[in-house]
Amino acid sequence: MSNEDEFDIGSLFRTSATLTFVIEIVSAIVMIGSLAAFYIGGALPTLDPDLLILLILIGCIITLVVFLAALGFFIRFSRKINSIVFPPGIDLIDIKKPKVRPIVIIYAALVGVMGVTGIYVWYLVYKNILGPWAMANSSISLQIFSFAMGAFFIALLIQIIIALVGRSARKVILGVMDVDDSEFLE
């Protein structure tokens, strides 16, 4: 079998889960920072410039500590997260095998449509709630918070979808690969 006939579906699901988890971490940090900037921002112009620099440095330290803690959590639990998303048992699949390609395409379409639905839901929330809130306060911080919240929500939704679809796709693909085509010809 040539490499063109093989598709590493396990790696695809695990990489997608890892990527969405990193997006969630970064967007959560950006959300916290932008809300802090919005609520603290009004008091900053009245502070002494030396104290302002100290507060910015402390904010950077806190952000880096939170990021390192989240990264440490991720590294520690990466294998567990990956095995939950797409348990071992199937990694490389023969894409040329009957019925395998259509199933992979259908699952990919399902993940894609659900991802687009998540993006559209965030758009509606932004258009009707978050955008007007940011505009009413004339705040760039709230705009940044809105986009970070959208990234977090979309990444979380896609991660949940990938986890659920990955587990079911594994079972279906294993079932299809085990079926002997000769029984359908009789």
Image: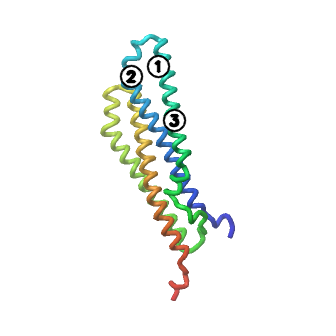
Local secondary structure at mark 1: helix
Tag 2 residue: 40
**In the visual, does 68 lie left or right of 41?**
right
Tag 3 residue: 67
**In the visual, does 133 lie left or right of 145?**
left
Report x, y in % for residue 183.
Answer: 52, 85
Q: Are marks 2 and 1 in contact (CB under 8 Å)?
A: yes
Q: Are marks 1 and 3 in contact (CB under 8 Å)?
A: no
Amino acid, disc 3: Phe
Q: Earlier in the sequence, mark 2 or mark 1?
A: 2
Residue 55 numbered mark, or none: 1
The residues bearing labels 1 and 3 have C-alpha atoms spaced at a distance of 18 Å
What residue lies at 56% left-to-right and 60% top-to-bottom?
10
Task: Specify the quadrant that holds the N terminus.
Answer: bottom right
**In the visual, does 163 lie left or right of 5?**
left
Q: Look at discs 3 and 2 and give the one toward the viewer.
A: 3
Residue 182 numbered mark, or none: none
Q: Count the marks.
A: 3
Q: Nearer the viewer, residue 23 or 54?
A: 54
Report x, y in % for residue 47.
Answer: 41, 12
Amino acid, disc 2: Ile
What residue lies at 48% left-to-right and 69% top-to-bottom?
172
What residue lies at 51% left-to-right and 37% top-to-bottom?
69
Residue 64 drawn above or below residue 105: above
Report x, y in % for residue 68.
Answer: 54, 36
Q: Nearer the viewer, residue 84 or 20?
A: 84
